[in-house]
Each structure stands twice: as structure tokens, then as C-alpha cells.
Image (spheres, rainbow, N blue to C red):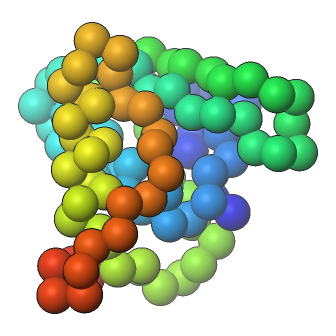
Amino acid sequence: MGYLYYGGSDPIRIDDRPLAHLKVVIATKLRRNESFTLTWRHPDDQPQGRSTVWLHPSIPLRFVFDEAEATSLSRRWIEALAHSANSTGGVMLVDELLDPPEDALSV
């Protein structure tokens, strides 16, 4: 289980694999100096619902992973997250979309 620290708010718990994919999309958007929202469903051990935060390039952001080794990334999943990032609803953490083996990225 990884954590996303944003500004002074409580850490957001996200599994390492989805967090690694979000990191690529979020870093790309912020590098372009673009603000956007990030929405996720609450984990099973929290009250039912979803949360949204407004991400802005000037707010400190830190990704913390439990696993020391980087995971392989799914190009298809990153594309789905990036597509949502460019919508009016912002990035929605969607379930993983699996790539055929030859399309997997190692980062």
C-alpha cells in the first residue's frame, strides 16, 4: 500500500501499482503546469464513497511506495488515466486495463 501526500492534507492510501500509474499521469500534467482534479473510490476499510482533490503545480506532492522495486507499467492503463485527466471530470482512478505482454513498459 502506497501513499500520496499532497500539501498538508492527510496521506491518500493507494495500492503501489495504481499509484505508479497515477504518478506518470500526474507528473506529466503538472510538468505542463496544468491543474486538474483527482478522484478515487474509498478503500474497503473506509466509509463508502469517493474523494476528489484539486492538484496544482505549486502544491507539494510526494509519492511513497511500499515496494522498493518499480513495477512494470501498463501503457493501456496510463492512456486511460491520461484520457480522463484531459476531461472536465479530471483524473478518475479507474481499474487496471491489461496490456498484451508485448506492450508492457518497464520503468
Rendered-image quadrant of the N terminus: bottom right
Q: Which residue is more in the foreground, 37 or 94?
A: 94
Quarter occupied by residue 8: top right
User: Would you say 22 lies left or right of 24 here?
Assistant: right
| Residue at image location 41% in from the left, 79% down from the top | 70
Residue 7 picture location, percent across and down: 54, 26
| Residue at image location 28% in from the left, 31% down from the top | 84
Rendered-image quadrant of the C terminus: bottom left
User: Would you say 43 lies left or right of 53 here?
Assistant: right
Above/below status of 52 relative to 23: above
Q: Which residue is more in the foreground, 44 or 72?
A: 44
User: Would you say 72 lies left or right of 12 here?
Assistant: left
Residue 30 picture location, percent across and down: 23, 33
Residue projecting furthest to the left:
32
Q: Which residue is more in the foreground, 86 or 3?
A: 86
Is residue 60 visible from the viewing direction of this image?
Answer: no
Residue projecting furthest to the top:
88
Is residue 83 visible from the viewing direction of this image?
Answer: yes
Above/below status of 56 relative to 96: above
Residue 35 picture location, percent across and down: 27, 18
User: Would you say 62 lies left or right of 99 here?
Assistant: right
Q: Which residue is more in the foreground, 10 or 74?
A: 74
* Count of marks overlaid on the render: 0
Above/below status of 4 relative to 100: above
Residue 20 picture location, percent across and down: 42, 61
Quarter occupied by residue 16: bottom right
